[in-house]
């Protein structure tokens, strides 16, 4: 297991298009988190899954955003009708519930909406 | 509501200097605190994890301390090198029954000049 994997690394899209990102967590981790980071800021929580259940969504996650984690393995984050304000780095992290272990982050997907 | 603040926002030092990065948080009810490094355009790399019951952790030239009662953590970097240039983020983790998500500071951008 080589850690948390995110694809694509970069995505440039036109305003109004839909985009989908994928995250493959560390296989033994049952929790998966999505964060968004804009330039010069720390990451902000978007949503998290425990196994296949989506347990919390931030108010940052508008109706245009949807995340899934079928079968409790990989996760996808879809943004519909993208806006320029969606331009950011989208980070995925995984961990194990019930343990004090730290998070492992992926390399992120950089989204640019033009 | 938990808020995390990092001071300074940016720091430039000559190579070889010892330096301290500061992190403060408003709610002392944390599970643990994690320091990350982020290179430009990249994901987050975990540096040190301090459990709420611990006072400090060390890894090589890095030492992180935690004072829960005052809501403070420091990251000490000894004998800084140009390769240490990056953004350093601290994050506090909420308890598992609160989702275990991380709350980040805005980061300290460190530049070490040769």
Image: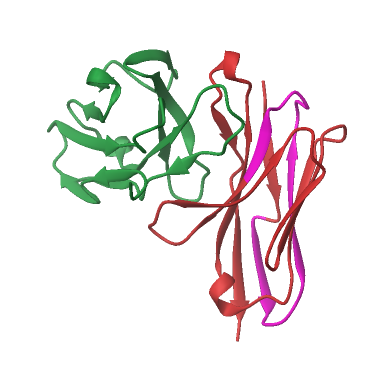
Q: Colour of chain B?
A: red
Query: How many marks on residues?
Result: 0
Magenta range: B9-34
The colour chain A appears in is green
> Which is nearer the eye, A50 or A114?
A50
User: Residue A81 appears in which quarter of the rendering?
Assistant: top left
- Most foreground residue, A67 or A96: A96
- In the depicted view, which residue is nearer to us: A66 or B83? B83
Residue drawn at (63%, 43%), measured in percent from left and top?
B34
- Give the residue displayed 28% in from the left and 37% down from the top: A23
| Direction right: furthest residue | B69
Picture residue at 36% right of the left edge, 14% below the top = A54
Query: Looking at the rendering, which quadrant does residue B13 occupy?
Result: bottom right
* Rendered location of residue B78, percent (x, y): 74, 71
How does the figure colour the protein chain or chains?
Answer: by chain
Residue B100 counted in the magenta span: no
User: Is A59 displayed left or right of B51 in the figure?
Assistant: left
Q: Residue furthest bottom?
A: B114
Q: Quadrant of the N terminus of chain B?
A: top right
- Image quarter where the C terminus of chain B lies is bottom right
Q: Is residue B16 on the magenta stretch?
A: yes
Q: Position of residue B72 (x, y in %)?
A: 80, 41
Residue B53, horizontal then vertical, whole percent:
79, 33
For the point 77% across and 72% down, the residue is B18
Q: Nearer the viewer, residue B108 or A14?
A: B108
- In the rendered structure, the answer to whether residue A62 lies left or right of residue A22 reads right
């Amino acid at each position: 297991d080589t850690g948390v994997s995110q694809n694509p690394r970069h995505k440039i899209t036109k305003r109004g298009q839909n985009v989908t990102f994928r995250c493959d967590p560390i296989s033994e981790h049952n929790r998966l988190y999505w964060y968004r980071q804009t330039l010069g800021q720390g990451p902000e929580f978007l949503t998290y899954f425990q196994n296949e259940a989506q347990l919390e969504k931030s108010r940052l996650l508008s109706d245009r955003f949807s995340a899934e984690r079928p079968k409790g393995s990989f996760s996808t984050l879809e943004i519909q009708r993208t806006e320029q304000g969606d331009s950011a780095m989208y980070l995925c992290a995984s961990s194990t519930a019930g343990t004090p272990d730290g998070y492992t982050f992926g390399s992120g997907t950089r989204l640019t909406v033009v | 509501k938990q808020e995390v603040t990092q001071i300074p926002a940016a720091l430039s030092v000559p190579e070889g200097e010892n330096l301290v990065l500061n992190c403060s948080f408003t709610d002392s009810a944390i599970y643990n605190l994690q320091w990350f490094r982020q290179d430009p355009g990249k994901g987050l790399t975990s540096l040190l994890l301090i459990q709420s019951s611990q006072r400090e952790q060390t890894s090589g030239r890095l030492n992180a301390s935690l004072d829960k009662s005052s809501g403070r953590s420091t990251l000490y970097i000894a004998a800084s090198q140009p390769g240490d240039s990056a953004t350093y983020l601290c994050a506090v983790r909420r308890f598992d029954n609160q989702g275990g998500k991380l709350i980040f500071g805005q980061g300290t951008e460190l530049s070490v000049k040769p």
